[in-house]
Structures are given as C-alpha cells and as structure tokens.
Image (cartoon, rainbow, N blue to C red):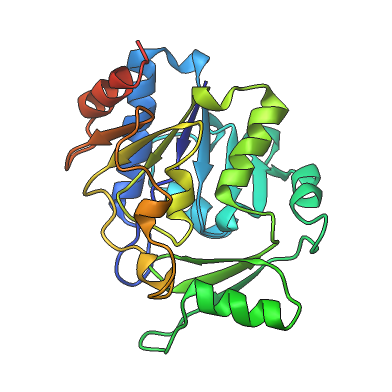
Amino acid sequence: MLFVIAADCYDCNGKSTVNFQEIIKNVMKAAGLCLGLGRIGFVLLTGSSLRETMEALKSCPVNIEDFDAIICNSGSEMYYPWRDMVADLDYEAHVGQTSGSRSYSYIIKPGAKTRKVDEIRQRLRMRGFRCNLVYTRAASRLNVIPLFASRKQALRYLSVKWGIDLSKIFVFVGEKGDTDYEELLAGLHKTIIMRGSVGYGSEKLLRSQDSFKREDIVPQESPSLGFVEENYEVHDLSAALEALGIK
C-alpha cells in the first residue's frame, strides 16, 4: 500500500507553509494507527525542485529516509532517499522518450501578465513544440516538462515498478493546488481531500473561458474520494481512511 502526499501548501508568495510539515507528520501518524508503518510506503509528490523540497523538509519532524520516493518538478524527476537520493534514470528516459527529458522552470514576477496553460500549449503546438506545462507554487512558477511527465504518470510508473495495484494507492491533497491538481482527483487510486490545508493555488491559470470545466473531469461524488473537513489532525485522517476501506 502506498500513501502519497501531494498537498500544494504555499503562501501568496509561493513559499512553503507550515501546513506542509503538519500534513506529512499527521499522515504518517494516521498510517501507523491504521495499518502500522511497516506495511505502508510513502511518496512525496510536488511541483517544487528537489532543493526546495529538501529545504522545506528541514523543519519537518520526520526523517527524509521515511519516504520511499520523492517526485519533484511536477512529476519530471524521481528520487529515492533510501538510495542516497539517487535519481531514477529509467523514469526520466520513460517520460522523455518522444520529446526529450529536459525540463525548465520559469519564475513569474509579481504583477506580470500571464497566459493560461491552454493558451500557451496551443501556441507551442503551432510551432511544433510538444510538452507539459504546470503552474506551481501559487502561480509563481511555470514548469515546462516532457510531454509524458506528470505527477499522475509518476504514480502509474511506481505502481508497475513496485507491483502495487492503483486501488491500493492513497493520495492526500488540498481542495486546490497546482494546475495539474485535477489530474490527481480522478483515477483508480483513492484520494483524500483536506479542506482548508492549501491557502493559495494556481488553478486560475489552468484553462480558457471556452474550455471544458472541472466537473467534466472530476466526479462530484465518487467512492474513491474522501474528505477531511477544515482539519487534518491524525484522528480526522484516520476516520477518512477507514471510510475508504482501510481498517
């Protein structure tokens, strides 16, 4: 079984908040109460760089080695703390097989005019460039990554690599986040939405007015969705996990 922490906890300036550390601590404690830590793997899934992620984890009351994998830059890079933070080169080759594995991050200056992901993607395709675009860190950065790289694709890769059924993967998110946030809500895995845990997202830069809407992608009600109301204490997370079938 795999617990995936993918809450995009940033302030209005794109800096990591204390909620990030609290969620990690409480999810791991809830895992221990429900099943025991030895039966669960932990993955951190973020749009930040590895350096930024390591910096945010410095004040977290858990060991970096408690994570089985850390996936950075919106799913374009995968590292294993138990192997001295070695990058998974097979994964990089996998996601970059058609468009190359190089990724770029652009800082968005405060007040700068920005285009939505839909518009940028269309302009790039007209020029023959195919890639995946993700606004992250409260819309203060744009990650340009290989076409087949994504946080959801990273989960599929680990599912196959480690032989874990997707239905045994539990993803913990806020009620908003980076522009790839919606992809984490639908699928065979189970998702727990922690309301109130994320203050600033990037969703306003996702799609144009005439594009499809969120409800076209994400089911409003699903047996694979669980909710924690305005809190993410250990007992609240444990109750949400039990409601999704963990006992």
109 over 231 or under it: above or below: below
Q: Number of marks in the image?
A: 0
Q: Say which residue appears at 72% left-offset and 29% top-offset.
A: 161
Residue 147 or 139: which is nearer the viewer? Answer: 147
Q: Say which residue appears at 50% left-offset and 37% top-offset.
A: 187
Residue 118 or 176: which is nearer the viewer? Answer: 118
Residue 141 in the image: x percent, y percent?
49, 72
Q: Is 49 on the left or on the right of 94, as rendered?
A: left
Residue 170 in the image: x percent, y percent?
44, 30
Q: Say which residue appears at 35% left-offset and 52% top-offset.
A: 215
232 over 205 or under it: above or below: above
121 over 97 or under it: above or below: below
171 over 244 or under it: above or below: below
Residue 45 in the image: x percent, y percent?
51, 46
Q: Say which residue appears at 23% left-offset and 45% top-offset.
A: 195
The quarter in which the C terminus is drawn is top left
Direction left: furthest residue: 230
Residue 192 in the image: x percent, y percent?
34, 35
